[in-house]
Image (cartoon, rainbow, N blue to C red):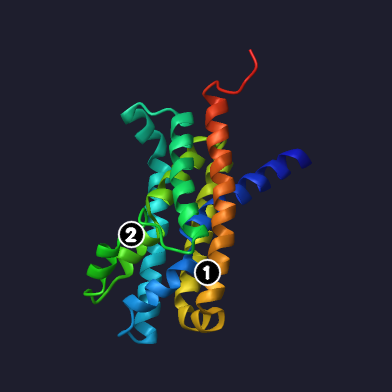
Amino acid sequence: MLDSIQEHIQFLLLAFSSLIFIVDPIATIPTFLALTADAGLTDRRRMAKRAAWTCFLVLAGFAMAGTLIFKMFGITLPAFRIAGGLIMILIGLDMVQARRSQTKETPAETQQAMEKDDVGIVPLGVPMLAGPGSISTVIALMAQSTSWLHSAWIILAVALTAVISYWTLAAADRLGRRMGDTGIHILTRFMGLLLMAIAVQFILSGLTAAGFGTRR
């Protein structure tokens, strides 16, 4: 019984840490403040809420449709684990260097967003929060779940990530002032390092599942 509870807690922590590190709402603060420079506090919170809801709906949707996607394209779970791990490593490398990954959004997309009145759904929700890395991560997590309870933990992890993203963006003014660029960069580098460790584990698990590195 205790072993089962511990296993479920570990899976929830893995799902949540993987998602929150790769979504990385802290690193989104400077871009969010730049995109909403002309907006009032109420409008900023409204856009933060839209971004969080968009993030939740997109990630939850891909999580539920993950198995169907695998069947449609004939993709195996080990292959997706490896591919997802590689994307996470690329994002992690950019985070370690304290810069926004272009797998989330390109400078051109950010520049176009500056001209919009409401940036809550695009580009904040997609692709800044729910980008290719987080989408591939949530699909890989859902595909390796062994029970409906595991699937529920993944959806819970997505919901927690969306809520934390909302709180972070809604308080972007205060957090930006208190942490400063240096504080944000330090935290981003630390999260990037942890994300890369999780990514390597994804790749190793994929290789093992594919039959590499096992004794014959």
Q: Amino acid at mark 1?
A: His
The tag earlier along the polypeptide, 2 or 1, is: 2
Q: Amino acid at mark 2?
A: Glu
Query: Horizontal and vertical percent for residue 145?
Result: 55, 37
> In the rendered image, which residue does mark 2 sit on?
105
Q: Is residue 71 left or right of residue 79?
A: left
Query: Horizontal and vertical percent for residue 121?
Result: 31, 65
Query: Horizontal and vertical percent for residue 162?
Result: 47, 62
Count residues near mark 2 (Cα–Cα under 10 Å), then give few for <14, some for 14-19, many for 20+. some
Mark number, residue 194: none
Marks 2 & 1, CB-CB < 8 Å contact: no
Q: Secondary structure at mark 2?
A: loop
Q: Residue at x 69, y 41 (%)?
A: 7
User: In the depicted view, which residue is nearer to us: 79 or 8?
Assistant: 79
Give the position of the C terminus as an image quadrant: top right
Q: Residue at x 39, y 63 (%)?
A: 53
Q: Quadrant of residue 178?
A: bottom right
Report the mark closest to the observer, 2 or 1: 1
Furthest-top residue in this view: 216
Query: Horizontal and vertical percent for residue 169?
Result: 45, 73
Furthest-right residue in this view: 2
Give the position of the N terminus as an image quadrant: top right
Q: Is residue 24 left or right of residue 123?
A: right
Q: Is 190 placed above or below 3 here? A: below
> In the rendered image, which residue does mark 1 sit on?
185
Q: Residue at x 45, y 52 (%)?
A: 91
Q: Quadrant of residue 170?
A: bottom left
Count residues near mark 1 (Cα–Cα under 10 Å), then give few for <14, some for 14-19, many for 20+. some
Q: Is 148 placed above or below 9 here? A: above
